[in-house]
Image: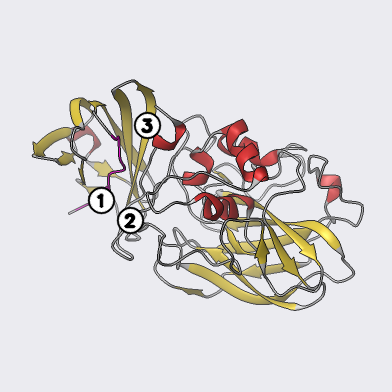
Amino acid sequence: MTVRRWIALATAAVAGIAIAVVANVAAPDPASAHGAMMKPGSRTFLCWRDGLSPQGNIVPKNPGCAAAVNAGGANALYNWFGVLRSDGAGRTRGFIPDGKLCSGGNSTYSGFDIARADYPVTHLTAGANFSWSYNMWAAHPGTFHMYVTKSSYDPNRALSWNDLEDTPFLSVTNPPSRGAVGSVDGQYYWNGNLPSGKSGRHIIYSVWTRSDSQETFYNCSDVVFDGGNGEVTGIGQTGTGDGPTTTVPDSGHDAKCMAIYKITSAWDGGFQGEVEIMNHSTSPYDGWSATWNFASGQTVNSLWNGVLTTSGSQVVVKNVEWNRSIGVEQSTTFGFTASYSGSNSLPTVTCSSP
């Protein structure tokens, strides 16, 4: 099975289509994927845009993006909004190692720590007022800090803390939001000045610290200060940092229940999968269910930690007694093995709680 068949789906209602997301169980935070800088676009966001196809596969065309995927796997792009540490607590220098700033020390995103000068880039004007936006895959209160690299920054050298200015040039707490949670359109937004006295290629490094938990997000945005107004170059489609609106699969997130579907191992004609059910509501769940439709030729062979019901192509999994309760911002998982013939295409997963 090719890496493009490694799939996961975070589910809810936005435009009637679904977005593929993969989580890596070895990452420090296995449970969440909640946001990324969109203006100026983070590496994972712009590389996702670069590689997104109408079929839902992600095959980057940009050489920097392709190198990152070759080194670290495609999971990072299916889950482009998940560069986080659940134990971050706002920590930066001394917590995230030098050379791992762009991944936040999260192994799923290690490919994006590779030093290159050919990632997609956003063109900006130093000192200008800029309209910032940050994806709101799940809504949380907190503070955004933006740092910029020093004039001595070399894009061909792995980013270290000494490459960044010591203090953020811009900070904002609990900015306003717009659009639907769990979609590309769902965004925090604010206006603020870009750093002055900068020219040429740099990185804007953003740190989003939740005030209601220790979860912290780390993003590298490649920019060039050349008098631009937010134009993006180096991707397969042009734009100014917003996600495409007509070809983006639906987020599948209703701000209450999120399901992440992933392949944990695969072989010719079969695979083992896992679905994580996450509670992003304000009260505990007392029971849950997950539903998807397999394409022709896909069949669940066995399932654990859930009760399976099938009807034709439809798969419904409900809780067992011991995992029926999911606390606020907590999760549970069930696993299965499945076989397929022909194309192992992407299912659309939805989850709900009574």
Q: Residue at x 38, y 39 (%)?
A: 7
Q: Looking at the image, which residue is at 67% across and 69% down?
A: 231
Position in image of residue 164 (x %, y %): 83, 52
- Amino acid type assigned to the residue bearing label 3 in the image: Ile
Residue 105 visible in the shown view: no
Asked if one can make out residue 235 in the rendered structure from this viewpoint, the answer is yes
Nearer to the camera, 294 or 63: 63
Q: Quadrant of the N terminus?
A: top left
Place residue 301 in its image quadrant.
top left
* Disc 1 residue type (three-letter): Thr
* Residue carrying label 3: 263
- Judged from the image, the secondary structure of the residue bearing numbered disc 2 is loop
Relative to 23, 350 lies left or right: left
The stretch of residues the image draws in magenta is 343-353
Q: Position of residue 229 (x, y in %)?
A: 71, 75
Per the image, is 58 magenta? Answer: no
From the image, tell me which residue sits under label 2.
252
User: From the viewer's perspective, is residue 9 above or below residue 283?
Assistant: above
